Image: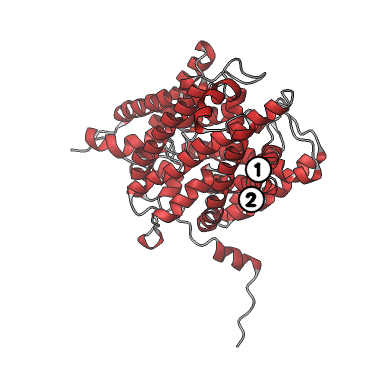
Amino acid sequence: MISPRPNSESVVADLTANEYEREPVPPSRQKGWKGFLGMYAGEHAAGTEFMIGPLFLAAGVSAFDLIFGLLLGNVLAMLSWAFICAPLAVKYRVTLYYKMEQICGIRLVTIYNLANGILFCFLAGAMISVSATAVGVPFQMQMPGLGDWLPNSVGWVVAVIAVGAVISVVAALGYDAVARFSNIASPWMVLIFLACGLVTLPKLGVESIGDFWTIAQTRIWVGGEPMVGQMKFTFWHVVFFAWFCNAAMHFGLADMSVLRYAKKWYHGFSSGTGVFVGHYMAWIAASLLYAWQLLRDPANTSVAPGPMAYEAVGVAGLICVVVAGWTTANPTIYRAGLAFQAVLPRSSRFTVTVIAGVIATIGAIFPALVMQLLGFVGLYGLILMPMGAVIFANAWVFPRLGITPDAAVANGWKWNWAAAGAWGLSLAICAVLMLGFGVDVFFLALPGWIICGIAFVIFSKLQERPKPL
């Protein structure tokens, strides 16, 4: 007897088999180093690197501040993944969103997840924009300028929609599909990033290793005033940006959703492949591309990765920009889908991930999202990161102080006022520091996290119900 042909719904169900959104990942689904090395390298040596590198230069950074600031900041980021996020991920083996529900209650988590999902969508949208600049090169599409806020051509809109559709489908197929895509693409992308830097150096006047530092200080990262619309970056701006550009992932614990699949906590050190290859080598290489563009035509301040990579290494550069955007946007949309699925638990993860992809694609149509990427990344971390302190305190501090963990589950609450108050207080204090005292957003994520954690412990102790005798 011939089995009936499966319909499209059954195929999707097979492809999106249990992602354990509301239960611990079992030992049979846990993974070793390999999947995480490729995932992090693919995600962080990716599309936004082509934007962030040039934006450092536009921010008037000096050679010393960039080279050594990135070194220190990326070491701190890797340690944050390894010692803050990974131990909690393997301790609970559930998504951030489900753990938040157990601690904070469904109503507060709904607000958090909506904010989380939307911000993830906009971050993925910036990555879609990066890939779209490469898709448009063969068609001589007009690229958005550094100061553009609105789309400047129909071709741009079409390119963004085409790229966004492909990325959304891959992300909707689940973690395994995302990891496979990253593992295949990341080694080749890393080589292209390296090639872009090596090819550009002689064009900037670097003829030997001994020439590099002199040329770096005088022709590449010369410091000075930032370009119009960009903030000035110093050494500490670079350090804190490199450390906290992924604050929501490590201090904010969003990567619990990924590292819950890790067999051991020290697999969190896999993030090193992302930060040192992507957030060090790739940022510097992309910055060199922009320096060469400005040297050829000082009036051309457009930050369009596609044309820059094409001028350096040809068609391979275009392909790299497209694929780099995919490998970054895929896990980001996947995370956004998990956030939305926590808000709408009766909806399939496939459906909510596609919805996240649509939101990301709409955001990508507007160039301002990617042209102001440095500031957006800082704000994104500031908003989401403090709630990671809530889970951290719940896991490691509460048992030592005799405070009941997972208060929402223990007490049947739908809203944990201690968590809500701590989050709100931290954001309010950071807002006062930023708007009232001019503290740059990049320096606020860490104090915001600490304030939220301390406030949550105090509020929870005050809120603790007396135990019956």
Residue 51 appears in the figure: no
In the rendered image, residue 409, in percent from the top left (x then y), is placed at 36, 44
What's the residue type where badge 1 is placed? Ile
State left or right for residue 413 relative to residue 396. Answer: right
Q: Which mark is residue 274?
A: none
Spatial CA distance of label 2 from label 1 is: 8 Å
Rendered view: 13 above or below 77: below
In the rendered image, residue 210, in percent from the top left (x then y), is placed at 49, 29
From the image, tell me which residue sits under label 2: 167
Label 1, residues with CA under 10 Å away: few <14, some 14-19, many ≥20: many
Rendered view: 427 above or below 177: above
From the image, tell me which residue sits under label 1: 128
Q: Nearer the viewer, residue 399 or 273?
A: 273
Asked whether disc 2 touches disc 1, contact meaning CB atoms under 8 Å apart, the reply is yes
In the rendered image, residue 437, in percent from the top left (x then y), is placed at 50, 11
Which quadrant would the N terminus be assigned to in this image? Answer: bottom right
In the rendered image, residue 154, in percent from the top left (x then y), is placed at 82, 40
Residue 369 appears in the figure: yes
Which quadrant would the C terminus be assigned to in this image? Answer: top left
Question: In what element is the residue under mark 1?
Answer: helix
State left or right for residue 356 relative to residue 81. Answer: right
Label 2, residues with CA under 10 Å away: few <14, some 14-19, many ≥20: many
* Mark closest to the chain's N terminus, 2 or 1: 1
Q: Which of 295 and 333 is in front in this view?
A: 295
Question: In what element is the residue under mark 2?
Answer: helix
Rendered view: 452 above or below 99: above
Residue drawn at x 35%, y 49% is 90
Rendered view: 202 above or below 354: above
What's the residue type where badge 2 is placed? Ile
